[in-house]
Amino acid sequence: MATMNPESIYDPYTTQPGEPLGTTPMVGEPGGGSTFGLVRDLLRETEALARTEIELAATEAKENLNAAQRAAGVMASGGAVLHAGLLTLAACAVFALDLIWPTWQAALVVGLVLAGIGGAMMASAKSKMRPRALVPDHTMQTIRDTRQFMRRERDRAMEKWQ
């Protein structure tokens, strides 16, 4: 098993991207305990957190979009095959009704029935198509939670300073 070089390990919450783990000054260390240093670290960590959340949202949105694209492709192929089958069944129904009605009347009845069924299917599908399905819900909730946490911490810090 290869040994890991501690210099190659980095912490995404360090003050500079790519800095080795443990190089961020802590409270009590030089440059780590001042108010300015703490605010600077908070701003850098907030920026890193926001950047990470944005990347996560983009990744989640891409995954949702890819899944929707795959489903749409399968639906389109299935629709084409279904259409061919329905045309064949419609012709069969017209030929069967032609035995008891005139040809024009048989075709009219079959056409109206199929148009009604197609309209009902379209209305059902339209109600199920939601643009909201592409929103990265998990990431959005994480961002809301982070914002709420940051506000609570800000308010708590403000109370201590008063």
Image (spheres, rainbow, N blue to C red):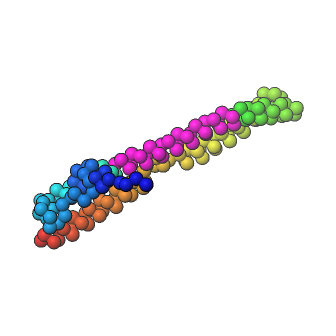
Say if residue 69 shows up in the picture.
yes
Residue 109 picture location, percent across and down:
76, 35
Count of numbered circles in the view: 0
Front-lying residue, 15 or 43 = 15
Residue 10 place in picture, x, y as percent:
30, 53
Give the side of residue 2 with respect to residue 128, left or right.
left
Asked where in the image residue 75 lies, by quadrant, the reply is: top right
Q: Is residue 77 left or right of residue 32?
A: right
The main secondary structure of the magenta stretch is helix
Give the magenta range: 54-82
In x, y percent, where is residue 50? 29, 52
> Residue 41: which quarter of the image?
bottom left
Q: Residue at 22% of width from left, 50% of height from top?
A: 16
The residue sitting at the right extreme is 99
Looking at the image, is 159 positioned above or below residue 131?
below
Which image quadrant: the N terminus? bottom left
Which residue: 26% across, 62% down?
150
- Is the residue 28 above or below the residue 109 in the image? below
- Res 111 quadrant in image: top right
